Image (spheres, rainbow, N blue to C red):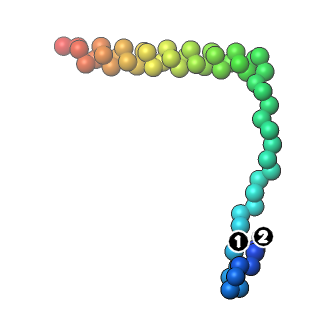
Amino acid sequence: MPYTTEDGGRLNNFAIEPKVYTADAPTQEQKRNYAIMGVAGALLVGLLVFVAYAVSNAS
């Protein structure tokens, strides 16, 4: 464990930091998949709103 000694003799324990890396740009396939998931999510939310509206006005 990486300990440091502060003034007065107190030990301070720091967490081990993870390695830093740069993110890669998404590929064309990943961009297409993100677009498909976005459309599917928007349709799901629209369907849920429609069902909630239909159920609240039913009777």
Q: CB under 8 Å between callouts 1 and 2?
A: yes
* In the rendered image, the vertical position of residue 58 relative to residue 15, given as above or below: above
Helix, strand or loop under label 2: loop
Is residue 9 found left or right of 46 in the rendered image? right
* In the rendered image, the vertical position of residue 22 relative to residue 39, given as above or below: below
Residue depicted at 77% across the width and 70% down the height: 1
Query: Tag on residue 46?
Result: none
Q: CA distance from mark 1 to mark 2?
A: 6 Å
Looking at the rendered structure, the kind of residue marked 2 is Pro
Is residue 45 found left or right of 22 in the rendered image? left
Helix, strand or loop under label 1: strand
Looking at the rendered structure, the kind of residue marked 1 is Asn
Judged from this view, the residue extending furthest toward the bottom is 8
Where is residue 3 shown, x and y percent of the image? Answer: 76, 74
The residue where tag 2 is placed is: 2
Residue depicted at 33% across the width and 19% down the height: 52
Q: Quadrant of residue 6?
A: bottom right
